[in-house]
Image (cartoon, helix red, strand yellow):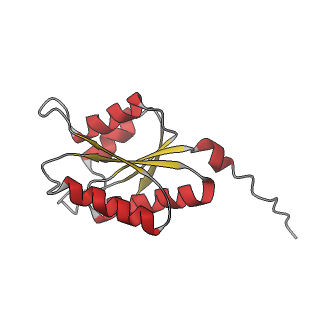
Amino acid sequence: MSYYPEPTYIVSYLFRRILIPVDGSAMSYKALEVGLDFASRYGSKIKVLVVEDPSIPDVNEVKKRVTEISSKRGISIEVKVKKPNYPDTSVATAVVEELFEEHYDLVILTARGRTLNPDLVMGSIALSVIINSNTSIFLIR
């Protein structure tokens, strides 16, 4: 018979502040659900980052949906909208800038968001954030 010690919830100390970039795609809402699970189980503070991008038709609609999803779970989150300085700044750069401006313990993002090409395993934004981030990444496929 194996002995399994009680969980110590080290996760609650490692991932206190979590950033979740949301672009309005179904996959980004899946990342939000995972983040809300972290918050409900471990007490993590969640900040959702919506980067204004021409591919997002209505940023306010994305913010509204994020708020609805979190309030259904009874979890309070912060939603931040960031407008990149095009053409000098990309969506990925805006996410990485947020990581450097604030201190986060974890970023939860999806491998693909609004990418139209189904043959891509990982989108350019996810890849760029992974390469340039200063914190741990939880990638959802």
Q: Is residue 102 above or below residue 108?
A: above
- Tell me which corner region of the image, top left, top right, bottom left or bottom right, holds residue 14: top right
Q: Which one is nearer the viewer's eye here, 64 or 41?
A: 64
- Tell me which corner region of the image, top left, top right, bottom left or bottom right, holds residue 97: top left
Q: Is residue 95 visible?
A: yes
Count of residue discs: 0
Residue 45: percent from the left, percent from the top? 52, 47
Residue 33: percent from the left, percent from the top? 44, 63
Q: Which one is nearer the viewer's eye here, 13 or 58?
A: 58
Residue 47: percent from the left, percent from the top? 42, 47
Q: What residue lies at 29% left-to-right and 60% top-to-bottom?
A: 64
Residue 30: percent from the left, percent from the top? 39, 63
Quarter of the image with the C terminus in it: bottom left
Q: Residue furthest right?
A: 1
Q: Is residue 141 visible?
A: no
- Tell me which corner region of the image, top left, top right, bottom left or bottom right, holds residue 110: bottom left
Judged left or right of residue 94, residue 46 is right
Q: Which one is nearer the viewer's eye here, 43 or 26?
A: 43
Q: Is residue 102 above or below residue 19?
A: above
Quarter of the image with the N terminus in it: bottom right
Q: What residue lies at 29% left-to-right and 56% top-to-bottom?
A: 63
Judged left or right of residue 68, residue 56 is left
Q: Is residue 101 above or below residue 17?
A: above
